[in-house]
Image (spheres, helix red, strand yellow):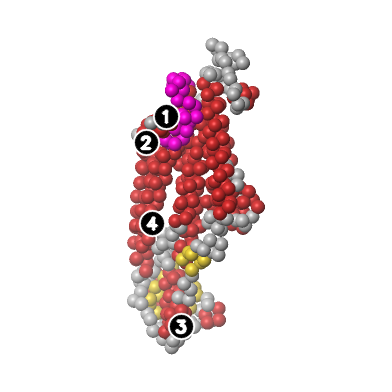
């Protein structure tokens, strides 16, 4: 069995049993799901009540004088005083006034108490459209007057088709993915960095390094904790899918329709992002003397990875402009940029392929550098490697001798 696999299995089994991980990976999503279900259930109850809430109206224009469709919850009043009295008495939840110049201006005023019925604008629109179209003899034309648009958005560059109620979901999903991936990556990479710092401080690594190479050890840690990250991602995606499935009836999440290609692309870049970020965190853990110091340095790199958020307006304005394309090809910003750009445009295949190749090459290079630095740092226990020593560690065939105090002798 490969040695890196033994390391990966050890890291995965060790951390997945931690209470902190179980709470973050399972407890938090379940709590959010429970809260969302309760909130949406309350909203659904309010919506169902508001749909049948009694609504009054005063028609100064005469367009509703011969109303052919008058649902039970719509009541006509002769004047505004009568409608206001009914509202004060609690007989209606609100009333609207059709102004005398409605056919020219379309102006309508709605009056209600502090708790206005939800979706009242839709109910009024449907009521007016139904009665205005009643005089149209052609049933098909009357139906179009009531519901004039059945929008279907087609993007010419990638052929993606989005329903009218799914447009919002396509734009929201990338931001949700990016937020989850950042949180999961920082958490699992934090485990990796803490593990390196702890094992280095306890000198456990000096024993392990006699049976496994630094590269194998680092690769095993990355793979094991990467699998841990995938578990978290799977739990979050399952929780999100459960919330969407259980609450589509409320209408609040009816527009969430996530394209499968976006999910696949996001998972690919999550893995690439994690391995690159994790390799950097391992290198930081190798050169620092304490976990507090390593977290301070890691915060700087976390800020660099989050740079695309500061350029989000550019993605809205020109997703294929020079800056988004350049950030797509920079390994440290590519994952966030590609996922965010996918909400606004179809990214050319060559840009995705090139960014993936660059990320893989950069990750391999960073892992190699971190392994070299890690090996040398073990020989300097209790002493922080200087920049000169780090540069020497990266030279091909570099050798190092240490005295009893850890000083370099050549």
- Reading the image, the residue beneath label 4 is 244
Q: CA distance from mark 3 to mark 4?
A: 35 Å
Q: Which of disc 3 and disc 2 is earlier in sequence? A: 2
Image vertical order of residue 369 relative to residue 319, above or below: above
> Residue 47 at x, y = what percent?
37, 64
Mark 2 and mark 3: Cα distance apart in space: 62 Å
Q: Secondary structure at mark 3?
A: helix
Single out the mark in the foreground, 1 or 4. Answer: 1
**Residue labelled with disc 1:** 3
Of residues 404 and 288, the one nearer the viewer is: 404
The reply to whether dot 2 and dot 3 touch (C-beta < 8 Å) is no
Residue 11, x across and y down, in percent: 40, 32
Crowding near the residue tagged with mark 2, few <14, some 14–19, many ≥20 C-alpha atoms within 10 Å? some
Question: Which residue occupies 54% across, 31% down?
Answer: 368
Q: Secondary structure at mark 2?
A: helix
Q: Residue furthest top?
A: 404
Q: Earlier in the sequence, mark 1 or mark 3?
A: 1
Residue for badge 2: 16
Q: SS of the residue at dot 4?
A: helix
Q: Earlier in the sequence, mark 2 or mark 4?
A: 2
- The residue that appears at 41% across and 65% down in the rendered structure is 118
Task: Give the labeled residue for mark 3.
Answer: 141
Mark 2–mark 4 contact, CB under 8 Å? Answer: no
Q: Which residues are magenta?
A: 201-225
Mark 2 and mark 4: span between their CA atoms? 27 Å
């Amino acid at each position: 069995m490969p040695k890196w696999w033994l390391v990966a299995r050890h890291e995965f089994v060790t951390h997945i049993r931690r209470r902190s991980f179980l709470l973050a990976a399972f407890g938090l999503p379940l709590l959010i799901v429970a809260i969302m279900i309760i909130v949406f259930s309350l909203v659904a109850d309010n919506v169902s009540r508001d749909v049948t809430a009694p609504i009054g109206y005063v028609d100064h224009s005469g367009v509703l004088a011969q109303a052919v469709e008058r649902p039970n919850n719509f009541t006509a009043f002769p004047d505004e005083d009568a409608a206001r009295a009914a509202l004060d008495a609690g007989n209606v939840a609100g009333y609207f006034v059709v102004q005398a110049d409605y056919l020219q201006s379309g102006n309508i005023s709605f009056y209600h108490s502090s708790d206005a019925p939800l979706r009242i604008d839709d109910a009024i629109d449907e009521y007016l459209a139904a009665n205005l179209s009643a005089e149209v003899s052609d049933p098909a034309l009357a139906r179009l007057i009531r519901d004039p648009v059945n929008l279907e958005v087609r993007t010419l560059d990638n052929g993606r088709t989005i329903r009218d109620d799914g447009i919002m979901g396509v734009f929201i999903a990338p931001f949700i993915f990016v937020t989850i991936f950042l949180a999961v990556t920082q958490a699992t990479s934090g485990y990796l960095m803490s593990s390196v710092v702890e094992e280095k401080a306890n000198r456990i690594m000096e024993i392990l390094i006699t049976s496994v190479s630094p590269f194998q050890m680092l690769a095993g840690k990355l793979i094991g904790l990467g699998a841990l990250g995938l578990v978290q991602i799977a739990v979050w995606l399952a929780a999100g899918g459960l919330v969407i499935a259980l609450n589509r009836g409320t209408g609040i999440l009816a527009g969430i329709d996530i394209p499968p290609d976006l999910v696949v692309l996001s998972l690919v870049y999550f893995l690439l992002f994690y391995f690159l970020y994790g390799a950097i965190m391992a290198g930081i853990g190798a050169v620092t003397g304490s976990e507090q110091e390593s977290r301070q340095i890691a915060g700087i790199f976390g800020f660099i990875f989050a740079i695309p958020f500061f350029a989000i307006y550019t993605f809205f304005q020109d997703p294929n402009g020079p800056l988004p394309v350049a950030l797509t090809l920079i390994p440290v910003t590519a994952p966030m940029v590609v996922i965010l750009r996918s909400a606004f445009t179809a990214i050319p295949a060559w840009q995705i392929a090139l960014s993936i190749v660059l990320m893989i090459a950069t990750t391999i290079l960073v892992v190699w550098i971190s392994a070299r630095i890690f090996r040398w740092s073990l020989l300097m226990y209790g002493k922080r490697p200087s920049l000169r020593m780090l540069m020497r560690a990266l030279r091909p065939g570099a050798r190092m001798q240490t005295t009893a105090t850890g000083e370099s002798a050549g």
